[in-house]
Image: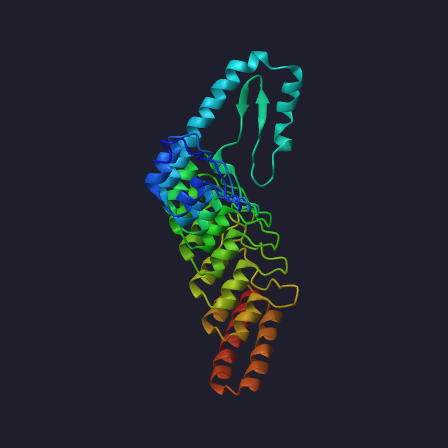
């Protein structure tokens, strides 16, 4: 009834919230349909930069997200047609303005407003409008595990590598959410496995942190860097050892390096800045199976004796004779293997 009475579909509350936004936020599909039939501004964001598409992606409203994307495609096509018709009328100054438009794009909203001889191009694609904190609709859909919405966004050419200011990519978010299907979709669209956050974390690191072996294997197939870790040199292997993920440790130490002639390229004694290594943390947390795998994989004789010394100290402190006996057998057994191999 209000729409029939020509109500202003783009009116805002004092908090900057539009009718289309509140309908998208609450999943009111039929209301969104009615608003889209009018000249509603689907690009209007609230104060923190959240767009109608962003909130629909965040809340998992697939039908609404699809309608917004389809409406955006129509608007973009109309704008392109206007631009094409008026191109001959474009002045030299306007040509210069267009050549610089990429540099003037807002880093968060990605909006590109400009006017050409009667043809007004208001916004870039809605799929690229980011919140003020840098999160895109694709990023939030990956973080929330909204598989179907992620597919829709990718089908509408969402930037698969668009990171937040702290360097977190959609692939990282999908790995953190442990969503295998979304990770597969992103990798099929050539998402970078090498994006590193400002803290030095990679998608592989977070996959190891949460113990998702299937995702780790997918990243391996895309040649993810196994020894790249946090800024304090905490590697994927270190975090797997710390959390006791034996199957992941076994996978990582067998990692094939395309630039190495060695089958096992992971440095199991690579130390963090505080001096801790994967072997050290496995010993400290009493993960015997992991210790044995690390020792058999790639350690120097000196490292074996250092590990033995650590075992001794820990077990004297913990008064655990049984564990001390087992650890002694493991360490000296491995030492004998290496000694026989090299001598």
Q: Residue furthest front?
A: 5
Visible in this render: residue 336? no
Above or below, 39 relative to 287: above
175 or 218, nearer to the observer: 175
The single residue placed furthest to the top in the displayed view is 88
Quarter assignment of residue 106:
top right
Q: Residue at x 45, y 38 (%)?
A: 189
Toward the viewer: 46 or 177? 46
Q: Position of residue 227 (x, y in %)?
A: 57, 55
Could you tell me residue 296's position as x and y percent?
Answer: 50, 66
- Look at the image and tell me in which quarter the C terminus lies: bottom right
The quadrant of the rendering that contains the N terminus is top left
Please give the name of the residue rendered at 46% of the width and 53% of the height, measured from the top-left corner: 175
Using the rendered image of the protein, determine whether residue 178 is visible from the camera's viewpoint. yes
74 or 274, nearer to the observer = 74
Residue 108 placement (x, y as % from top left) = 58, 41
Q: Position of residue 133 (x, y in %)?
A: 57, 48
């Amino acid at each position: 009834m209000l729409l029939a009475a020509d109500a202003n579909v783009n009116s805002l509350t004092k908090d900057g919230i539009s009718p289309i936004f509140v309908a998208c936020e609450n999943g009111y599909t039929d209301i969104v349909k009615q608003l889209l039939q009018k000249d509603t501004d689907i690009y209007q964001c609230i104060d923190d930069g959240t767009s109608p598409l962003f909130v629909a992606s965040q809340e998992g409203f697939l039908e609404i997200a699809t309608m917004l994307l389809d409406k955006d495609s129509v608007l973009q096509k109309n704008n392109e047609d206007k631009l094409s018709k008026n191109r001959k009328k474009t002045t030299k100054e306007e040509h210069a303005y267009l050549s610089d438009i990429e540099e003037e794009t807002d880093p968060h909203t990605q909006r590109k407003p400009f006017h050409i001889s009667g043809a007004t191009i208001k916004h870039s694609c809605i799929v690229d409008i980011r919140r003020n904190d840098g999160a895109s609709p694709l990023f939030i859909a990956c973080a929330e595990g909204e598989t179907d919405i992620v597919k829709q966004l990718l089908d509408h050419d969402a930037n698969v590598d668009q990171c937040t200011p702290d360097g977190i990519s959609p692939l990282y978010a999908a790995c953190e959410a442990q969503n295998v299907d979304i990770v597969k979709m992103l990798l099929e669209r050539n998402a970078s496995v090498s994006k590193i956050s400002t803290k030095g974390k990679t998608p592989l690191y977070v996959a190891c942190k949460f113990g998702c072996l299937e995702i780790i294997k997918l990243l391996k197939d895309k040649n993810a860097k196994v020894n790249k870790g946090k800024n304090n040199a905490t590697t994927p292997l270190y975090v797997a050892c710390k959390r006791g993920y034996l199957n992941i440790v076994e996978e990582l130490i067998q990692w094939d390096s395309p630039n190495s002639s060695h089958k096992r390229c992971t440095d199991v004694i690579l130390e963090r800045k505080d001096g801790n290594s994967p072997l050290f943390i496995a010993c400290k947390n009493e993960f015997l199976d992991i210790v044995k795998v690390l020792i058999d994989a790639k350690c120097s004789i000196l490292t074996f004796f250092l590990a033995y010394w650590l075992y001794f100290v820990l077990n004297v402190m913990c008064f655990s004779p049984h564990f001390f006996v087992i650890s002694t057998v493991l360490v000296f057994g491995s030492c004998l293997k290496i000694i026989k191999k090299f001598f």
